[in-house]
Amino acid sequence: DAKTTQPNSMESNEEEPVHLPCNHSTISGTDYIHWYRQLPSQGPEYVIHGLTSNVNNRMASLAIAEDRKSSTLILHRTTLRDAAVYYCILSIFTNAGKSTFGDGTTLTVKP
Amino acid sequence: ETGVTQSPTHLIKTRGQQVTLRCSSQSGHNTVSWYQQALGQGPQFIFQYYREEENGRGNFPPRFSGLQFPNYSSELNVNALELDDSALYLCASSSLRGASYNEQFFGPGTRLTVL
């Protein structure tokens, strides 16, 4: 799997947006970009994924750079429940089912 | 629709023993993946099963083995346990239709401690 690079930690204020970056300069043309998050004491949960175009769903938005070497997960209005470790993963599959996750970004949400 | 469940929740074993962990997939899912998550790290892919056959394997030795049953539930077996096997073991189910997977749903994990 191509490697991704994420900051170890980030902070946001409750009810404000947060942009979580991910660098993947060695991404191949067939790699999907997946984001999962893991709340404390739980298994990871799917957030969003995309290939080339920006994507929106009820949880978040995914902005993909034109050269696809980086992407940004956008949480539009963070709540305390969004405090979690966020993982950015590349996979040739439409899910991340055979991928090893990196160490992710720990998001702290301040009230 | 029930989610992914795993048993047991916690387990303590000693070095050299064998362990079996169990996973029940989400209803309608035909694929299960197993992951190992050491403390402070992200999940590492162990292997995936699709229709009872191994369908991909990560960088884990043969003493890690698995089974998937006709009802799509699954087992992870680890022989000759080592101290470094202490970790949270996660299973995730999904569906493979044609060449496309849907999203994975993870269970809460089994915390294995090897003494």
Image (spheres, helix red, strand yellow):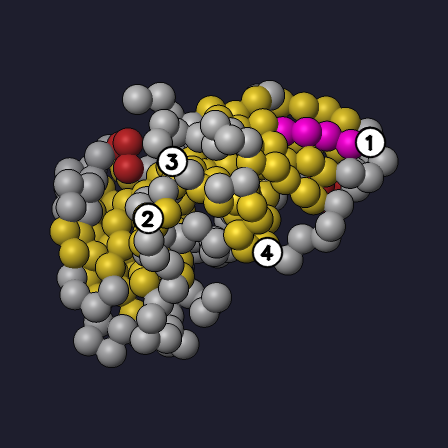
Give the CA distance from mark 2 to mark 4. Answer: 22 Å
Q: Which of disc 4 and disc 2 is earlier in sequence?
A: 4
Give the numbered dot on residue B58.
4
Give the CA distance from mark 1 to mark 4. Answer: 22 Å
Q: Which of disc 2 and disc 3 is earlier in sequence?
A: 3
Three-letter amino acid code at disc 1? Gln
| Left or right of residue B94: residue B17 | right
- Chain of the residue where label 2 is placed in the rendered structure: B
Give the CA distance from mark 3 to mark 2. Answer: 10 Å
Q: Secondary structure at mark 3?
A: loop
- Chain of the residue where label 4 is placed in the rendered structure: B
* Mark whose residue sits in front, 3 or 2: 2
Three-letter amino acid code at disc 4? Gly
Q: Which residue is mark 3?
A: B29
* Mark whose residue sits in front, 2 or 1: 2
Q: Which of disc 4 and disc 1 is earlier in sequence?
A: 1
Three-letter amino acid code at disc 2? Arg
Q: Residue at x 27, y 73 (%)?
A: A68
Q: Which of disc 3 and disc 4 is earlier in sequence?
A: 3
Q: Residue at x 48, y 27 (%)?
A: B71
Q: Which residue is mark 2?
A: B97
Q: Residues within 10 Å of mark 3 (few under 14, many from 20)?
A: many
Q: Quadrant of residue B8?
A: top right
Question: Is label 3 on the same chain as label 2?
Answer: yes
